[in-house]
Amino acid sequence: MNESGRDDKPKSQAQLALDNNTRLQGVLDQRRMLQDALRQAMVVTEAAKKTAGKGPPGAVTFAWGAGSHGQLGQPVVNGTLRSTNAPIAVQFDKLEDSAVRVASGSGHVACLTDAGQVWLWGDGRGGQLGYTMARSNNQPTPLMVESKEMKSPIAIVACGQHHTLVLDTDGQMHAWGRGNLGQLGLGKSIPTVPFPRVVSFKYKVTQIACGDSHSAAIDVRGKVFTWGTGEAGQLGHGFDKPPQGVPLTEPWLVAGLPPHLGRMAQIDCGAQFTAVVSERGEVYLWGFGEYLYSTLKENFAYVPERVQLPKKVL
């Protein structure tokens, strides 16, 4: 004990690792609570529209924070709304369906409706909105993406920093936006793709996710695939697959996940890392992130690393 009454005895390496993983579990719990709150906000607002007939048109979701690229979804009246620290209703035009999922990139936002339609708004300079040519002006209010390439309703939408990835109900992926680092998965690096393109893939896909400049998916067999830039290990293929600095331009199997895990059930990406959850509730991470890994390791993992959590993830 020191003079203040605190025990300054150094913690063991095992205790430090447990503390680190407990903090990560707390972050996951907070994120789940935020997602639940957003879903509840959408449900309450939609119910208010139908029953009371009050509130702004299309108030099915909310946005807050920075808005310099139009990502708050507000019509331009006296200039673009630069920012807000309180949730405001996104202004849709003639939206008759309910919003069921939202995603955001660096400066653009995507909203998926229960009818399988995708609406986007915000920064469109990289083609990430799917309905404007690259380098066009920002779009301050939502517009629906319409494409002959997307023949089935959309089930999942994900946003990277400057690209958008969607999954339709037939298990087919479609991508658009900036593709200079292979993040679109179209087989080659393309500076910009302003309209939806089919991502060629042998198997049907069940889950998708995007990081800043990489993308990931789980196929119908529960296998994980990644593509795009991997300089921080976010693709999970090790140091030499592909060589450092060389992007992957099409989906590539992440072979480092232990076979005993069985099928992967969930996937998500941060800016430069990827996370998956198995059907058994085990979590694996790879890529860059402070406090993501054991204190015995560096901030980078180039192959999947298991996170020792106090309880299984559902």
Image: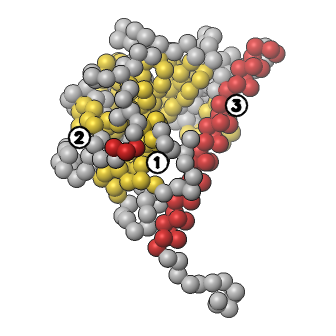
Location of mark 2 (residue): 247
Residue 86's disc number: none
Q: Is residue 121 visible?
A: no
The reply to whether discs 3 and 2 touch (Cβ–Cβ < 8 Å) is: no
Residue 314 sits in which quadrant? Answer: top right
Q: Nearer the viewer, mark 3 or mark 1?
A: 1
Q: Given the image, on which type of amino acid does mark 1 rest?
A: Val
The kind of residue tagged 3 is Gln
Between the residue at mark 3 and the residue at mark 2, the CA separation in whole angstroms equals: 39 Å
Give the quarter of the image for residue 264.
top left
Foreground pick, 304 / 30: 304
Alpha carbons under labels 3 and 1: distance apart:
27 Å
Give the mark nearer the N terminus: 3 vs 2.
3
Please tell me which residue is depicted at 71% across the width and 20% down the height of the picture: 46
Q: Mark 1 points at which residue?
A: 283
Of residues 24 and 88, the one nearer the viewer is 24
| Residue 47 horizontal/vertical position (percent) | 75, 19
Which quadrant would residue 208 be assigned to in this image?
top left
Measuring from the top left, give residue 106's x and y in whole percent: 45, 38
Q: Residue at x 43, y 59 (%)?
A: 293
> What residue did someone put label 3 on?
40
- Identify which amino acid the numbered label 2 is placed on: Pro
**Please, what secondary structure does the residue beneath circle 3 have?**
helix
- As measured in the structure, the alpha-carbon distance from the residue carrying label 2 to the one carrying label 1 is 25 Å
Residue 229, position in %: x, y?
Answer: 28, 42
**10 Å neighbourhood of mark 1: few (<14), some, or many (≥20)?**
many
Q: Which residue is drawn at 47% across and 26% down?
A: 157
| Quarter of the figure that contains the N terminus | bottom right
